Image (cartoon, rainbow, N blue to C red):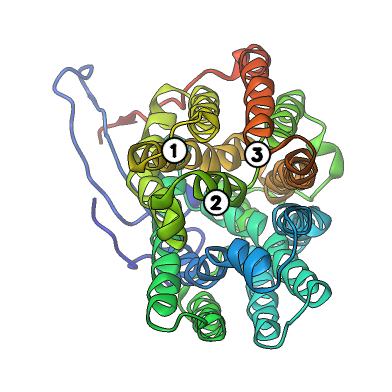
Amino acid sequence: MYLSFSDRGKTAVDAPAAADATATLDATSEDAPTGTTRRNVSRVSSVVIGLGITSMFTDISSESVAAILPLYITGVLGLSTVAYGFIDGIYQGISAIVRIAGGWAADRGDQPKWIAFFGYGVSAIARIGLLFATGFAALTAIVAIDRLGKGVRTAPRDALITASSTPETLGRSFGVHRMLDTIGAAIGPLLAFFVLFLIPNGYGTVFVISLACAFVGVLVLGLLVPNKRPRADRAATEHTTRTPFRWRQLNNPRLRRVLLVSGLFGLLTIGDGFIYLVLQARSSFAAEWFPLLYVGTNVAFLALAVPFGRLSDRFGRARVFVLGHIALLAAYVCAAIPVAGAAVTVACLVLLGVFYAATDGILAALAAESTPPASRASGIAAAQTVVALSRLIASVGFGVLWFAVGREPAMFIVSIALAVAIPLVAFLLRGLFTAAKPSVKTAA
């Protein structure tokens, strides 16, 4: 796969969305019909690469903090698991308040890059507060502002990825973006681990590094990522008038099914921090290497993001999405069983990585395929809003459940509920178990 920024500066007519991609691997099939050439083209746009680099630095920033947050809240600040569950719920779900607004603004103004830029900027500024927060209320407010910025930026960013990809390579484009994003998600916890290894109480140092990386990500987006206007580009390419955004475009039966299953699975997806705390309480290995548990998950995610993206292009995104939640169920079981040791911990981390690789970008691709270009960012935002709200409820609820019945019983209860939900979701998505049709071009 060749990666290039050579499409920078081209007009919408010269570089339409379907031909905007610049990383190309061509292969001609010998058994194609006479007079035709079947092109197996792997394309990754400069927009996708630039957004991936932005996300990489932003994830170094956010994951370096997320890796130490459970210990910082329960150990340094001395708060309970209920308090952690509330903050984790805020971390998971508060962005739902503005996700639809971010998608709507990107669709309405046809400027998704700059809406995403605003969201990244809000999150970067919020990290300044980590240097001064010393209590539950302040920390909750900072996490909320940071996640609101994430809510604004995510749908416009994913709409840019969609506008820069062809249907048959959409899963691969999201996979490449998530791969770069996950490189940052792996580096962040490593930085936090080494800082705390050298400076046992160096939480402030971690917060400073997090702030610096966040601002680097904002600069990369603002200065290096090419701008795209999906509706204007499409109108220019197809020589038609620009299609206005309409809310009724979201009233699509296919999208409604995607939203329904996203919410159902989201209610049964607890935060990774809870799983790591369960492993830490039972295993000396997990306790000693706690910040690196995030690295293990992210390394698995990094290795599998592109393969699962390609798999979704070939065999169907809904199939891969359901497969990811089967991996999540297996991770819950690993955390719940009364067996300690490094092998169980590593297996749990790998399964979580499989879950994220098979669902994170795939959900955005499913939502993008279910909405027209004029409302694509809003469609993606709708799916992400449902997930964020449902995961907020899941995190807060699991914190209370843990407090009420204990960690292992709580894990078993969630596992049983997810085991029941998986076949139900597979039934609801049965009509979406299809793959994108490859392009067939006629030779000149």
The relative height of residue 149 versus residue 347 in the rendered view (above or below) is below
Q: Which residue is mark 2?
A: 163
Point out residue 85 in the picture as x, y percentages from the top left corner.
74, 52
Point out residue 441 in the picture as x, y percentages from the top left corner.
33, 32
**Three-letter amino acid code at the position of disc 1:** Cys
* Corner quadrant of residue 413: top right
Point out residue 436 in the picture as x, y percentages from the top left corner.
46, 27
Q: Nearer the viewer, mark 1 or mark 3?
A: 3
Q: Nearer the viewer, residue 178 or 238?
A: 178
**Do the numbered discs 2 and 1 sit on residues whose CB atoms are within 8 Å?**
no
Q: Is residue 219 visible?
A: no
| Label 3: element kind | helix
**Three-letter amino acid code at the position of disc 3:** Arg
Residue shown at 52% from the left, 63% from the top: 67
Point out residue 145 in the picture as x, y percentages from the top left corner.
76, 71
**Three-letter amino acid code at the position of disc 2:** Ala
* Corner quadrant of residue 189: bottom left
| Label 1: element kind | helix
The relative height of residue 391 versus residue 418 in the rendered view (above or below) is below
Quarter of the rendering occupied by the C terminus: top left
Dot 2 or dot 1: first in sequence order is 2
On residue 407, the disc is 3
In the picture provided, is 246 more to the left or to the right than 425?
right
Q: Nearer the viewer, mark 2 or mark 1?
A: 1
Residue shown at 77% from the left, 67% from the top: 144
In the picture provided, is 122 more to the left or to the right than 419?
right
Q: Residues within 10 Å of mark 2 (few under 14, many from 20)?
A: many
Q: Which residue is mark 1?
A: 348
